[in-house]
Image (cartoon, rainbow, N blue to C red):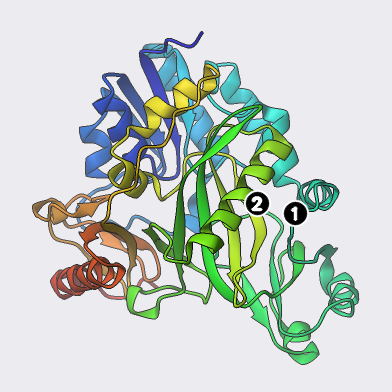
Amino acid sequence: MITKRRLLVIGIDVASIAASAKRSGYNVYAVDYFGDQDTKASTKFSSSQVQQVPRKSCGRISENFSPRSLVELAQRLTQQYPVDGILLASGFEDCPEELNALSHLAPILGNPLEVTVKVRDSMQFFDTLAKKHIRFPKTVKAKGIEQAQRAACQMNYPLIVKPAKGFGGGEVQLIHSTEELNSASLSEEVLVQEYVRGTAASASIIGNGKDSVVLTLNEQLLGIQQLGASGQFTYCGNIVPLEASQATLRTCESICIDTSNAFGLVGSNGVDFVLDESGKPWVVEVNPRFQGTMECVEKTLGINLVEAHIEACNGRLITPPKESHNFFTRIILYAHRRCSVPDLSVFTEVRDIPFPNVVIERGEPICSVLTEGKTRAQSLDRAQELAGQIYTLLSPEPESP
């Protein structure tokens, strides 16, 4: 029986998880990358890789983020503030050594390490889906350009090339021809994947290792240039719930539950899929942790997701309440150019709030916005309107040398 009252939340961005845990009455401690205002407001004590200082740059996450550094911060924090359990945000799903190190500080509440490894090993993942007759895009792992070329010969263009490990979608490339592939900048190890045209989507799932329930189906927002996205597949947020026919939604729920149960997922997890033009879902990956949809899911269902997660770790699955009739949008704002920010805490719909006057590099996340509307369009329009207001308040900074 898990009766944790002191929780450590750790990952790249932990603000939503920390706030949810605090609302449930937990004493919350945090280790994260960004060190935003709202993270610190929800915690008894927090430690961050980025030290936000006025007139100083917050740097680039692709260059500076280090799971090992977060583990070291957690080791120092727990020496002073012992915790009963650990909740994971993004950043550790592809880092088994670091997860093992964290498990020596306190129990990780959620998936066992071997489950996380299995769902994040692409070949094990897709082999399991194939055995369960779950639809997925054909995928081949490749090292170097020659193996990528051989993999491409097994598919039709266009196709997807993406790092075997990574997050955020910034390095995912849509390749249209052999010539494009030959000139593409590739990571050391990549996945060459069949391209499925359609709507990017996800399921927010709760599992207890044996059974699973879908809480919500969500539309993903990718590559929105107005939000400063650096690539076509950069993650820019989500809209909850996914808008589709009831028959399509039932099919999506079924395939996502089958995916979750195939791996014995525990707690809050995300299943990413593409809903093709004929309404068929194709499973792309599992995120074995809390997702960026978290606050939208909580508002849609009127639940506390940290509480539901811990209940599932104790073997008890909640019965999802009926969804709200409204739509909830979360978008992430990226900097169009190097800039400094005002105090964004004056906006009630802004989350992941940086400290005033810090410098954000071009292409890096500034904050996120969460809005509500009676329709999908109203919710998204309000989010984009607020994003426009925030962009006008940013002060340009000279580009760094």
Number of disc labels: 2
- Residue sitting at 44 percent across and 21 percent down? 76
Residue 84 horizontal side relative to residue 144, left or right:
left
Residue 41 horizontal side relative to residue 76, left or right:
left
Tell me the quarter of the picture where residue 391 sits. Answer: bottom left
Instruction: Kindly state the secondary structure of the residue where label 1 is placed.
Output: loop
- Disc 2 + disc 1, Cβ < 8 Å: yes
Quadrant the C terminus occupies: bottom left
User: Label 2 belongs to which residue?
Assistant: 255
Residue 396 horizontal side relative to residue 153, left or right:
left
Instruction: Indicate the amino acid at tag 1.
Output: Ile
- The vertical placement of 277 against 363, above or below, is below
Q: Where in the figure is residue 310, as x and y percent of width and height?
A: 45, 22
- Residue sitting at 39 percent across and 64 percent down? 364
Q: Where in the figure is residue 132, as x and y percent of width and height?
A: 80, 47
Q: Where in the figure is residue 388, as x and y percent of width and height?
A: 20, 75
- The vertical placement of 163 against 120, above or below, is below
Q: Mark number for residue 134?
A: 1
Residue 173 horizontal side relative to residue 143, left or right:
left
The residue furthest left is 346
- Residue sitting at 23 percent across and 59 percent down? 371
Q: Where in the figure is residue 158, as x and y percent of width and height?
A: 71, 84
Q: Mark number for residue 350?
A: none
Q: CA distance from mark 2 to mark 1?
A: 7 Å
Most foreground residue, 291 or 146: 291
Earlier-in-chain disc, 2 versus 1: 1
